[in-house]
Image (cartoon, rainbow, N blue to C red):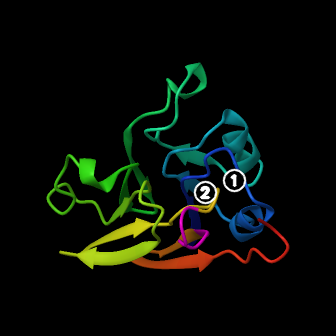
Amino acid sequence: MHRVGIISDTHGLLRPQAIAALRGCDRIIHGGDIGKPQILEELSALAPVTAVRGNNDKGAWAENLPETLRLEIDGVRIYVLHDLAQLDIDPQATGMRVVVSGHSHRPLITERNGVLFVNPGSAGPRRFRLPIAVAELVIDGQSVTPRIAELSLDNFA
């Protein structure tokens, strides 16, 4: 069994609640709009990190981040990109079980044609009245269980 943490749209802010929610993960996926390289360094202290570049990730530190990536965890194929509107593959036809994205700041889990689409929402600065959240995938063989974890902001902005 593998526990995969998913975070996106930190925009330079890694909240202690996000760190707590991701602690114990076997791997972390960052869906872009990271904000600064220190975010990836801090997440790497928790688990190996895979990240894509978001539309706001600028500068030399972000140049080597891919815009999309494919990975496989325990036989489960995952496609990662920042903005779902720019999905450039047919996930079902290419054997993807999960598509991870960010960008919208809206947490969402939905399934279409046997493919899970997971957007953890934003774990960074609050945007409008949207929740602050991360997500996780529990992969057990071919079983994939997604979950959104809304972060409590008591005593935090």
Residue 96 belongs to the span the image colors magenta: no
x, y percentage for residue 29?
54, 54
- Check disc 2 and report its element: helix, strand or loop: strand
Where's residue 23, x and y in %? Answer: 75, 65
Q: Secondary structure at mark 1?
A: loop
Marks 2 & 1, CB-CB < 8 Å contact: yes
Q: Quadrant of residue 17?
A: bottom right
The Cα atoms of the two marked residues, 2 and 1, are separated by 5 Å
Residue 135 in view here:
yes
Where is 56 relative to 147, above or below?
above
Q: Quadrant of residue 34?
A: top right
Residue beneath disc 1: 47
Q: Position of residue 9 (x, y in %)?
A: 55, 53
From the image, tell me which residue sits under label 2. Answer: 27
Mark 1 residue type: Ala
Residue at figure coordinates x 66%, y 64% from the top left = 25
Between residue 56 and residue 31, name the one nearer to us: 56
91 vs 55, left or right, is: left
Q: Quadrant of the C terminus?
A: bottom right
* Part of the protein shown in magenta: 127-133
State the residue at coordinates (75%, 54%).
46
* Mark 2 crowdedness (10 Å alpha carbons): few <14, some 14-19, many ≥20: many
